[in-house]
Image (cartoon, helix red, strand yellow):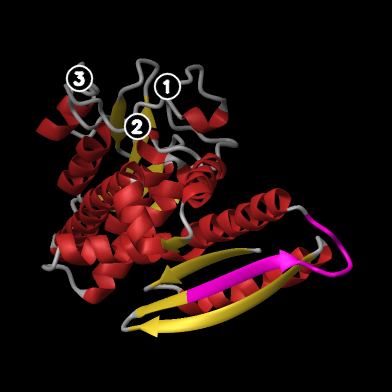
Amino acid sequence: MDCVQIGSYLAADSLRRRLFCELDYLRAQGLEISIRYRVLGDLTLIECTAKSSRNALVSDQDLRRLFRRRLANLTASMIFDEVEGALILDAVRTRHPELGEEEIRAVSEYAAALLNEGVGGVLEPSMRLKEVTADVEEYLCDSNALVIEGFIRFRMKEYMEELKRSAEEALIRFMAEREHREFVRLLKYFVDIQDQRQETVHVVRTAENRFELRSPEGGRVPGDYMDTLASNMAGEGVDVADLLISALITAAPRKVVLHFEPDSATAETIDAVFEGRVERCRGKDCTVEGCSMRQPSVTGEDPMAPAKRQ
């Protein structure tokens, strides 16, 4: 016979459901399982007892190994599926009380996505699950009781640090994206209230991977931003996307025609700032000099990618 107690503060109902789903498998392996519940404040403790059934004689050693291995798998899966998200949410809420509840949940979801993508040196989910399962199984080899949240906090400190790092990285990205959205709204407001100075501005990418704004007649649109955009400064610690948008705002066109394929982030920003004014050249029969939509790019480097900071 073998007896193990598993408890949880955050996911007691899930633990109960998972244990019941596990019963059929364990019984098929010749084990009889009994379960008892104890509630100690916010902690739900579930006592699981296994013994060999009358129809299948299983040695005590094999029974213990099988029983505890299955409990380790069940516990690790629950940590990943449910407890991890609750721990991230708690970490964000505790470390950043200045955030509203909606923001806390948004940052927590972002952090969970970063973990699943293996961002920041974190192992991919399948490898992390494997490591957590091994840690739980090793712990249950010498212990008959496991409280999931306590086990994570005190026996899996590196794992908790990964959760906290992901939460902090998610917050940084979330705030940057929010600031970007607010900045775009401000630019759009400025564009909407300013007088249009040009009817149409064509944006082309030159052979040197620089950008020029051209009038319908083919001449370069003059201005300081336009000169910088077409100079060697573009790309040297200068964010070309920001520079292009600044040049377009200065030109104040009624319509913008792009004769190149920008990256998705830049395209989204231009579309948002100049809402309803942006067109993509279809390439065929285009007469604008320097239009790259008529032929594929000869370089794999996209100058619209964010500039590398020194």
The percent position of residue 21, horizontal first and vertical second, equals 69, 72
Question: Observer-nearest residue: 230 or 132?
Answer: 132
Residue 281 sits above or below residue 38 on the image: above
Identify which amino acid the numbered label 1 is placed on. Answer: Glu
Residues drawn in magenta = 46-58
* Disc 2 target residue: 305
Identify which amino acid the numbered label 3 is placed on. Answer: Glu
Identify which amino acid the numbered label 2 is placed on. Answer: Ala
Q: CA distance from mark 1 to mark 2?
A: 8 Å
* Disc 1 target residue: 301
Assign a secondary structure to mark 1.
Answer: loop
Assign a secondary structure to mark 2.
Answer: loop
Assign a secondary structure to mark 3.
Answer: loop
Residue at the (48%, 67%) spot, across then down: 6
The quadrant of the image that shows the C terminus is top left
Question: Observer-nearest residue: 269 or 85?
Answer: 85
* Disc 3 target residue: 236
Decide: few, some or many residues near mark 2? Use Cα within 10 Å; few <14, some 14-19, many ≥20: some
Q: CA distance from mark 3 to mark 1?
A: 14 Å
Left or right of 50? Residue 16 is: left
Query: Which tag, 2 or 3, sits closer to the chain's start?
Result: 3
The percent position of residue 1, horizontal first and vertical second, equals 66, 63
